Image (cartoon, rainbow, N blue to C red):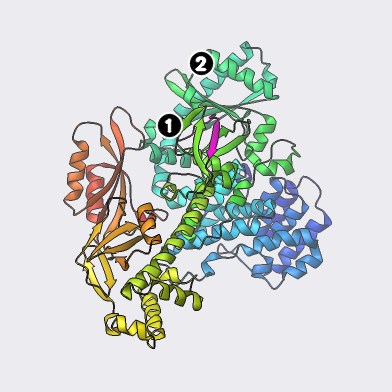
Amino acid sequence: MKLFDSFNDIDTIDKATERLENILFYSMTPKVRNALNSCIAAHEGQVRKSGIPYAVHPILVSCIVAYYGGEESMICAALLHDVVEDTEYDIEWIRDEFGDDVTSLVDSLTKIVDIRKEEFPSNSDTNEKLVAAALSFRKMLLASIQDIRALVIKISDRMHNMLTLDVLPEHKQRRISEETLVVYAPIAHRLGISSIKNELEDKSFYYIFRNDYNKINNYLNEKKQNLTLKLNNFIAKVSSLLMQGGIVESNFRIESRIKRPYSIFLKMQKKGVSIDEILDLLAIRIIVNENIDCYKVLGIIHLNLKPIISRFKDYIALPKENGYQTIHTTVFDESSIFEIQIRTDKMHNSAEFGVAAHWKYKNTGILPSTDWLNNLQYQDNNIEEFYEMAKNELYREDIIVFSPAGDTYTLPAGAVALDFAYAVHTELGSYAKEAYINNQKSSLLTTLRSGDIVRIITSSHLEPKCTWIDAVKTSRAKSALKLQCSLKIKEIEQKSAINILSTIFFDHNLNVVEAFVKEHNLTSQIPKATKDLDFLIDIKNRIRNNLKNNVNFISKIRLDRLRLKKQEFDNLIIYSNHTISETLFDYCCHPKHNDEVLAIKNGSKVFIHHKLCERAFLEVNEGARMVFVNWKEDKSTSYKIIVALEDKKGTLAMFLNTIVKYDCNVIGISYSGYKNQFMTTCEIIFETPLNDIKPLKDMLHKKYKVIDFFGLKDAYTQK
């Protein structure tokens, strides 16, 4: 982008100031001049890693903000965004000098502190980088929620940092780029600022996957002449068709582009294809004056060229959630495929500048929705889950579905009817029983398509759908289901803990245990006894000591028979003062290793159930005899491999036979992905006790077309 390229030679405060003065759409106001002078004075003597005066950075950030139409307060905040954190000036000084509006923006920006100074949870065994990125994500969103302008300034700040990344060590380049790719670029996307989003993605891609970037870039440079020739010929052809169709030459203009490196890389990974197999490398954009002209152009294009109907999208009639409006169509021409975008000048400005267009061009069109920000304010203790939900919510392809009344709802591609129910209202989702899609009775897990009309039928009572958490796609639905299920599990654990303690005391004292728990205000803590052995033993000992003087109790049982013994069975450990002969998995539920389970005692046998098993819940409610159960530590590590296999008989069997020789246990296979007449993309999940996975990985890369290979624990932190 020309603006960012113009920063390359700016290495002094005077040059940076001159650039700001040239970008401002009005003469520099006294307030902006004061902020500029304060910025220079506050950062006097400070330099960046490159040796350039530090003040150049905030000045160039303010240039980006000004270019995107930022008004006076935004430009002042951009100039002062590092002052409170890095200098002796405080927030009250800013309030005295610049007023409440600038102070509010600077305060929001200052709250987004350097996450690498944060202390990570001492009990966390997750990758530190994942937790750090997630915390940063959360802090930025919540700190900026009150004023969307702060998001635009922060994205501008990150944009300039990415332009100056070369001076940092390689590990810092990667760390900052990874954070940019999963945090800042998606937010730019949701704010509709595609020009910054594209630059952030390509810069991050370069630093994280430099070899892949260079391969794609070299390919595009080698093919540039041929691709440019194709584009020019196609533009000439389309121009001729439009004029023949009655559209005056002065009423339209055509821009062209070759797909960006990061977009090409994503498509290669998603489809499992090489760059030669990417069909839509070439695209043109037709920009006209009025909305109706977009449809005239579309008609001319479709009447004269062969459209690929499955690729047609009308975002003018049904805008994206971020306000984006454009008609997309894809056509064949002389054995080549071209993507065509059709929009007005106003739509073009909104697409390039997003929410910022409404400051820069004083637009009165559709403002990007910020509902997604509210949806992300989860106060969930599990930061990794928050990070995953936030990433899914921000970076997604959208579909648009309708309510029976004609209201539109934007959902991620792959969303199911239950996602729609939660999008309408949390209560509708919680009480949903079935759905009617286009007047056809359907399951709540039916995948929706763009344009579907969805009606939800509700039940009179709440039924937590805990097994559906992985089926829904929206963070709102996932969060609501997890909350319902966690409340139900807590209820089950509370009753199970009472039953376990009662069983320890030889089933004579269910009422005594309940009374003790109530008397000592342990109702909210007692569920912990189903998972924490030390806590269970402590409560048991307290009850025993409390009952030592109870004659009736002493006459019924011997106190020395209350000690819990560890008893091992395959992959389970039972703690009980009763002798257990065997453990069995009942027929009603099928818990997997490390699922939350409970153990119901029947004679000398123990039956294992998932904690959310309905049949087990009935028994627990009736005071079933229970024992403490835990899984043995699993020393195997799980991996996922995505591999393109030849589409012929026996290929999959040969591949599986290969990895079995390396002591791998296959636990999941799916054919989800791109398929052509030669290759099939196959996803395989397996576990192995191997400490060194490198020999297996190297062998598979040599023998097969491996698209991706990673440990499931590292799914969000791949190297």
Near mark 1 (Cα within 10 A), the count class, few <14, some 14-19 or many ≥20, is few
| Residue drawn where x is 69% and y is 21% of the image | 251
Q: Based on the picture, tell me whether residue 708 belongs to the magenta stretch.
A: no
- Identify the image quadrant of the N terminus: top right
Q: In the depicted view, which residue is nearer to us: 283 or 495? A: 495
Which percent across, then down, holds residue 267? 42, 37
Give the dominant element type of the magenta stretch: helix, strand or loop: loop
From this viewpoint, is residue 9 visible? no
Q: Describe residue 161's horizontal placement relative to residue 214 as left or right.
A: right
Tag nearer the camera, 2 or 1: 2
Decide: is 646 above or below 50: above
| Residue drawn where x is 56% and y is 65% of the image | 114
Q: Earlier in the sequence, mark 2 or mark 1?
A: 1
| Residue drawn where x is 67% and y is 18% of the image | 249
Q: Based on the picture, tell me whether residue 448 belongs to the magenta stretch.
A: yes
Decide: is 201 above or below 15: above
Label 2 sits on what residue type? Leu
Which percent across, then down, holds residue 26? 80, 46
| Residue drawn where x is 63% and y is 64% of the image | 111
Q: Which mark identifies residue 223?
A: 1
Residue under label 2: 305
Q: Secondary structure at mark 2?
A: loop
Q: In the depicted view, which residue is nearer to us: 25 or 564? A: 564
Residue range in magenta is 445-460
Q: Quadrant of residue 528?
A: bottom left
Question: CA–CA distance between discs 2 and 1?
Answer: 25 Å
Which percent across, then down, holds residue 138? 56, 58
